[in-house]
Image (spheres, grey):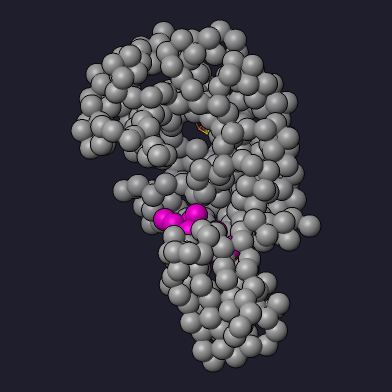
Amino acid sequence: MNKKRYIIPIFVPHKGCPHDCIFCNQKKITGQLEEVTTGDVNTKIKDYLNTIPDSGSQIEVAFYGGSFTAIPLEYQEKLLKAAFMFIKAGRIDGIRVSTRPDCIDERIMANLKKYGVKTVELGVQSMDAEVLKLCNRGHSPEDVVNAVWILKEFGFSVGVQMMIGLPGDNEEKAVKTAKELIRLKPDIARIYPALIIKNTYMEKMYIRGEYKPMTIDAAVELSKKLLILFESNGINVIRIGLQPTENINLGKDVVAGPFHPSMRHLVESLIYRDMMVHLLKMAGGRKEITLRVNPRNISELIGHKKSNIDFVKSNFFIDKFEIFQDKSVEPDTLVLFLGEKYIIMSKKDYYSISSK
Ligand code: SF4
């Protein structure tokens, strides 16, 4: 049986970060202003563990938020040790950290290894030198390549985080970034459409009219392309879009930009809409349609606020549109019935069509 995965997030805000990326205000994003202590780590882990079932769980502590490996080694050790105690006691299975690509070296890696870190996620954001410069990232695409090599040498599972819609970025550069990252064979990826967070330089640019964020539709469309690229190459995309928190919501700390609390759902729904469109084109001008789908995928098929159903009905002039949830249909697959005959399309089929 597959174990259910749980992440216990511990945010280490902006600590030790040697740069000020124009889109970042870690204190705002994490909602955490104070320095994290070993006592905080201890309490947080214990509190979370009380809510997680003892058996059948795969539990990791994640140090997110700032640039973990850029904080003084002594402080890294303190925090790691506090979490490592729970590994030794058999209460958690591992630790993951997020950091910058230019804050990776052999000494730091050896320390992470020593304390049970399994995964290191790199904030890459872009593999385009101009975008990195405009965003004041302070590292180069080459730093990303070096960092991934070192991480792989040490046997870490590697995560890459990329952003879309940053100043100087465009679709071509985003696709190129994804392709370059894919060549590095990371284990996991995250896609974040750039948002304008309060008290950042990007907010100033936005107010001065020097920066225009992506629209939601454009961000969903591009995220879909990138998701297909990563997944077709066997890379698991574990998140699309910033996680909503009490403060991360439009009108609060997010001033503007393509924010949606269920960005991933919007992207997946768009994939299902495309799959339906392919099937309907193959069916050719039917007025009555019956689709069967595994219950796991019903919500993506219907789309946000039934948007997929409305889209298909109005674009294909369908009079009767029936959808059945059917456990015998493979997950990630649609079956379109045409009287005696039927056409099947899996997500994999769709990916191979769309990547041609
Ligand atoms: S490196 Fe990370 S933590 Fe530091 S300013 Fe940039 S985005 Fe924020």
- Quarter of the image for residue 53 reads top left
- Determine if the magenta segment contains residue 136: no
Q: Nearer the viewer, residue 276 or 303?
A: 276
Quadrant of the frame with the N terminus: top left
Q: Nearer the viewer, residue 279 or 230?
A: 279
Q: Going 53% across and 81% down the picture, which residue do you hit?
A: 290
Q: Nearer the viewer, residue 189 or 88?
A: 88
Up-down relation of residue 143 to residue 172 (above or below): above
Quadrant of the frame with the C terminus: bottom right
Across and down, in percent, residue 308 comes to 53, 73
Across and down, in percent, residue 340 comes to 61, 83
Q: Which residues are magenta?
A: 261-271
Considering every residue shown, the one lying at the far front of the view is 340
Across and down, in percent, residue 176 comes to 74, 44
- Left or right of residue 228: residue 302: left
- Left or right of residue 151: residue 1: left
- Quarter of the image for residue 285 reads bottom right
Across and down, in percent, residue 138 comes to 63, 27
Q: Going 28% across and 33% down the picture, which residue do you hit?
A: 55
Q: Going 35% across and 12% down the picture, which residue do you hit?
A: 81
Up-down relation of residue 244 to residue 92 (above or below): below
